[in-house]
Each structure stands twice: as structure tokens, then as C-alpha cells.
Amino acid sequence: MNEDNIIEENAEETQQKLNYQPPVIENNTNTTPGKKSNAGLVFNIFIAVAIIVLYILFFTSHQKQEIVQPVGLKTALSIAFVDSDTIWENYDFVKATKKELDDLESKLTNNYKAQAMAFKAEYENYLKTGASLSLNEQKKKEAALQQKQSSLMELEKSLGNQLVEVKQNKNIQLQDSIFSFIKRFNQGPKYSFILEKSRVSGILYANDSLNITKAVLKGLNEAYSKGIN
């Protein structure tokens, strides 16, 4: 049974009680018909007002129940940040990798320069002595020089691609070593988020109390010295 039916039944029951006519007791007092009808009108108005109030209370209570209460977080978030610029400048693995890449670049560059200088010397020599050669010998020499020039250009491209590939692989190794250490460092976990802050990052401001760069850098260098990456 819903609340609307309850309201209607209560109203009908109340109206029946009001319309109930008690037995007439004869006495010498005369009842005035006008007063009797006025009393009935007052009671009808009272019932109508009561029904309206009940309807208002009914709809108001339903509206209050529909209000969605905000859900609170079960656990508080804890955040820290690491200054990646400081890490890349002071992480021993980064320093060693930079030296390794510099040495490789110097080796590849020197290799290319040696072959380029040899080609230049051979070409300049041909310019000096080519006139003394027969036409057929000149054509053969020029074809050989063109082939060496093409090989030299291919070597330059190959050495450049080799250097780029090595740098990419080294960067991946460095990033993996940092991510792996951060995961070990944050076991528990200690923090909900560890953010990266740098000169080009999207973080405009971070409170220094959230800075864990020193602890992370120390741990990274200790792990690297032990061969743990």
C-alpha cells in the first residue's frame, strides 16, 4: 500500500466521522441551522489544508532522498617528486653512458674522416696526374673515384644510424634503471604518485617538502656501484 492511498483513506475516514450524526436529545435549547452549517464548512477547510500539507511533506521527503552524497576517499593520497635534471646531471650511470657514447662517436667520426681524407688525397692526385693518362685510363679512374665517393656517403649514413641506435638503446637502459629503482624505493607503497619535475615539465610549482631527489639519487648511485640496474 502506497502513501497516496493512505492519505486518501484517512481523509475519507475523517470525513465519515465528521458526517456522523449523533442521536438527538430533546431539550429546551434551540439549535440555529446557520451555526451548524458554518461549523461543517470550517471542518472541511481544515481537512483540505491537512491533505495539502501531507502532500508537501511527502514530495519534500522524496526529493531529499534523491540528493547524492559525495563519496569520500578511503585513503589519503601521498605525492612526491624527483627533479630529473638533477638526476641526469649526477647519476653515475648517466655519466658513464655519456662517456661511452662520446668515445663511440669519436671512433666512428675518426673512421669516417680517415676514409674521407684518403679519398680527397686520391682525387686531388688524379687532378694533377690525370692528363698524362690515356682516355681509357681516365674513364676507369673516374669511375673508381665515383664508386669510392658513393661508398663514402653510404659509410657516413651507416655510421650516423649506428650512433643513433646505440644512443636510443642506452637511453632505454637508463630509463629502465630509474623506473626499476623507483619501484623498489616505493615498496609499501610510500607514495601514491612520484612525479617528474624538470625545466621542461608541466609542473609549475612543487613544495620543497615533497622533493625526494636526494634520496633517489643516492639510492641510484649505490645500486649502480653494486651492478644493480
Image (tube, grey):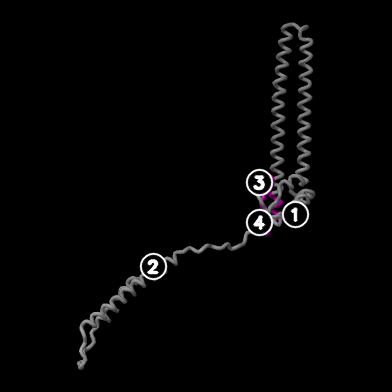
| Amino acid type of the residue tagged 4 in the rendering | Ile
Q: Is residue 42 magenta?
A: no
The residue beneath circle 3 is: 201
How packed mark 1 is, by other alpha carbons closer than 10 Å (few <14, some 14-19, many 20 or more), is: few
Viewer-nearest residue: 117 or 4: 4
Q: CA distance from mark 3 to mark 2?
A: 53 Å
Viewer-nearest residue: 159 or 68: 68
Please, what secondary structure does the residue beneath circle 1 have? helix
Q: Nearer the viewer, mark 4 or mark 2?
A: 2
Q: Which mark is residue 143?
A: none
Please, what secondary structure does the residue beneath circle 2 have? helix
The residue beneath circle 2 is: 59
Q: Nearer the viewer, mark 1 or mark 3?
A: 3
Q: CA distance from mark 3 to mark 4?
A: 16 Å
Picture residue at 69% right of the left edge, 21% below the top: 150
**Looking at the image, residue 61 lies above or below residue 87:** below
Residue 85 in the image, given as x and y percentages of width and height: 72, 46
Residue 48 in the image, given as x and y percentages of width and height: 31, 73
The residue beneath circle 4 is: 79
Q: Are marks 1 and 2 in contact (CB under 8 Å)?
A: no
| Amino acid type of the residue tagged 1 in the rendering | Ala
Segment colored magenta: 179-200
Q: CA distance from mark 1 to mark 3?
A: 21 Å
| Amino acid type of the residue tagged 3 in the rendering | Ser
The residue beneath circle 1 is: 215
Closer to the chain start, of discs 4 and 2, is 2
